[in-house]
Image (tube, grey):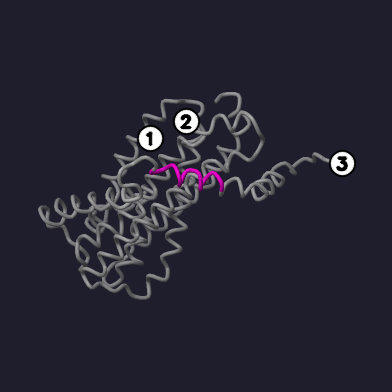
């Protein structure tokens, strides 16, 4: 029988971990596909929930901020202004909620076999991205309804989707690891998502924030993501506050790197604590 020699060297374990992450990529696809299949199982309208929730939120925000408060719309129809921000926000909020509870939901799997635990929260984010793609059909419908055609900036949209992924993974890894140790976070996460919706520029343009407060407002990492989405989708007069964008982007990068660091630090104890 052929045996494979295993050699442990200082500094090699981290490299082996990332190699294992690639080797177990099919498990990540399997977990994501399983969650997609059961997400809307036994619901009356199935995947239509991925369209109804953001659509109704968009209608409410358009009536409140555009119709009643008369806030500026950057020269585009207000529903498009709202939904161009609703897309990344719904992705982030859904990914954050699913990611934070992913380890607890897969506790039986974690306690029985070895695989890089990072696969579990990342697979839950893939599921949220599927909802993001489905919700994108509403934006296309709104553009067709208002006869709105984006300009060349739409080509930069994948860059801002990547930033949204970074923010979702970073925050999600922190909360997933903390939720294993402290189950209080199952109550904290819904509050964070609700609070974040109102302090992020989803129902209004971030241009209404006074210039002297823009740096403080940019401490919210979702500001750079939402402003980037609007800049890419709406084009025209839409601008990005560069200092605020750089600050917010830096925070996303720190959140992403620190999330991986903390998750890796706590990973060995998951099977014992969970």
Q: Which residue is mark 2?
A: 179
Q: CA distance from mark 3 to mark 2?
A: 39 Å
Question: Which structural element holds mark 1?
Answer: helix
Question: Which structural element holds mark 3?
Answer: loop
**60 in relation to 9, above or below:** below
**Which residue sits at x=35%, y=53%?**
223
Location of residue 197 by image quarter = top left
Report x, y in % for residue 10: 77, 40
212 or 269, which lies in front?
269
Q: Left or right? Give the position of 61 relative to 156.
A: left
* Residue 208 visible, this orientation: yes
26 or 10, which lies in front?
26
> What residue span does the magenta drawing correspond to?
30-40
106 or 245, which lies in front?
106
* Residues marked 1 and 2 touching at CB (< 8 Å): yes
Look at the image and say whether residue 148 sits in the magenta stretch. Answer: no
**Which residue sits at x=69%, y=49%?**
19
* Residue 266 visible, this orientation: no
Crowd around label 2: few <14 · some 14–19 · many ≥20 (10 Å): many
Kindly identify which numbered label has been placed on residue 142: none
Please tell me whether mark 3 or mark 2 is closer to you in this view: 3
Kindly identify which numbered label has been placed on residue 189: 1
Q: Which residue is mark 3?
A: 3
**Residue farthest right in this picture:** 1
Q: CA distance from mark 3 to mark 1?
A: 47 Å
Of the residues under marks 3 and 2, which one precedes in the sequence? 3
**Which residue sits at x=60%, y=24%?**
272
Crowd around label 3: few <14 · some 14–19 · many ≥20 (10 Å): few
Q: Left or right? Give the position of 133 relative to 12.
A: left
Q: CA distance from mark 1 to mark 2?
A: 9 Å
Q: Left or right? Give the position of 16 relative to 92.
A: right
Of the residues under marks 1 and 2, which one precedes in the sequence? 2
């Amino acid at each position: 029988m052929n045996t494979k020699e295993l050699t442990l060297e200082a500094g090699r374990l981290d490299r082996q971990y990332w190699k294992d992450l690639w080797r177990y990529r099919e498990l990540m696809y399997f977990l994501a596909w399983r969650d997609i299949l059961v997400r809307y199982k036994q619901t009356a309208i199935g995947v239509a929930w991925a369209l109804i929730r953001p659509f109704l939120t968009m209608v409410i925000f358009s009536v409140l901020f555009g119709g009643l408060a008369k806030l500026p719309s950057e020269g585009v129809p207000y529903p498009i202004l709202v939904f161009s921000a609703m897309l990344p926000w719904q992705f982030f909020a859904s990914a954050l909620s699913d990611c934070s509870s992913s380890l607890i939901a897969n506790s039986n799997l974690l306690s029985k076999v070895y695989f890089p635990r990072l696969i579990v929260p990342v697979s839950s984010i893939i599921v949220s991205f599927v909802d993001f793609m489905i919700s994108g059909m509403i934006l296309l419908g709104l553009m067709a309804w208002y006869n709105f055609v984006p300009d060349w900036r739409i080509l930069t949209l994948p860059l801002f989707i990547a930033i949204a992924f970074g923010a979702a993974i970073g925050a999600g890894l922190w909360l997933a690891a903390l939720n294993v140790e402290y189950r209080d976070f199952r109550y904290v996460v819904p509050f964070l998502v609700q609070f974040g919706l109102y302090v992020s520029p989803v129902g209004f343009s971030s241009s209404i924030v006074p210039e002297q407060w823009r740096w403080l407002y940019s401490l919210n990492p979702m500001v750079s993501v939402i402003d980037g989405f609007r800049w890419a989708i709406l084009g025209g007069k839409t601008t990005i506050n560069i200092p605020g964008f750089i600050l917010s982007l830096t925070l996303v990068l720190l959140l992403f790197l620190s999330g991986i660091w903390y998750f890796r630090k706590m990973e060995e104890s998951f099977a014992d604590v969970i």
